[in-house]
Amino acid sequence: MSAVTRRQFLKITGTTLVGSSLALMGFSPGPALAEVRQFKLARATETRNTCPYCSVACGVLMYGLGDGAKNARASIFHIEGDPDHPVNRGTLCPKGAALVDFIHSESRLKHPEYRAPGSDTWQRISWDEALDRITGLMKADRDANFTATNADGLTVNRWLTTGMLAASASSNEVGYLTHKVARSLGLLAFDNQARV
């Protein structure tokens, strides 16, 4: 702002004043843009979802075309903020507004992958294999490191060698159940993305 001269500041201020005055007098393109939006989304299927990026958990409306058949593969083509969502009331940050690029990205990971120890390549595995591997490793670690009582003989039932970071884009109910499951396993190192 220090590089702006007094004359440039007055030009910017005057232009802003003229633009906002014209918008208040009815020369705003709002109605025309609304009609184009209605025409663009008339045949689309609307789906409500939650933005996956950060801990705010903004609501989004996703619009897609196609019925899943071979000739009309379903695809999302427009995403906007959900005006009925209590968190964001229809607004989205730049990352949330660019979710269409995130969905259609060629480098987006869509399947679980595994890299063996000492290997430099990732191999695709099924969801069942991934979940079986995760649960097997968790059980082995819990069996080896679970502490039922401390040195004084008091019951502590804790598992200190594994931690969990929960997703913040879930509902309160899912967060509650996640917390209960983690605590029932004895996990003490438990946190949520909303606090990080």
Image (tube, rainbow, N blue to C red):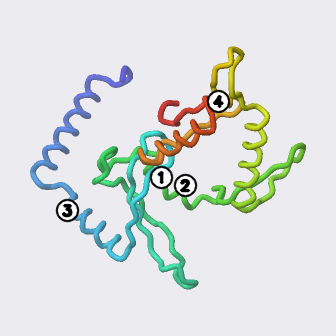
The secondary structure type at the circle numbered 1 is loop
Tell me which amino acid carries mark 2: Phe
| Badge 1 density bin: few <14, some 14–19, many ≥20, Cα 10 Å | some
Q: Which comes sooner in the sequence, label 2 or label 3?
A: 3
Mark 2, mark 3: which one is toward the viewer? 2
Tell me which amino acid carries mark 4: Asn
The residue lying toward the viewer, choosing from 39 and 54, is 54
Residue occupying image coordinates x 33% and y 54%: 82
Question: Pointer 2 and pointer 1: residues touching (CB < 8 Å)?
Answer: yes
Mark 4, mark 3: which one is toward the viewer? 4
**Marks 4 and 2, how far apart in space?**
42 Å
Question: Pointer 2 and pointer 3: residues touching (CB < 8 Å)?
Answer: no
Q: Position of residue 171 (x, y in %)?
A: 43, 48
Q: Which comes sooner in the sequence, label 4 or label 3?
A: 3
Residue occupying image coordinates x 51% and y 74%: 74
The residue lying toward the viewer, choosing from 155 and 5, is 155
Q: Which residue is mark 4?
A: 157
Q: Which residue is mark 1?
A: 98
Q: Which residue is mark 3?
A: 31
Residue occupying image coordinates x 22% and y 64%: 32
In this picture, residue 113 sits left or right of residue 50: right
**Marks 2 and 3, how far apart in space?**
30 Å
Residue occupying image coordinates x 19% and y 35%: 14
**Marks 3 and 1, how far apart in space?**
24 Å
The secondary structure type at the circle numbered 2 is helix
Q: Which comes sooner in the sequence, label 1 or label 4?
A: 1
Tell me which amino acid carries mark 3: Pro
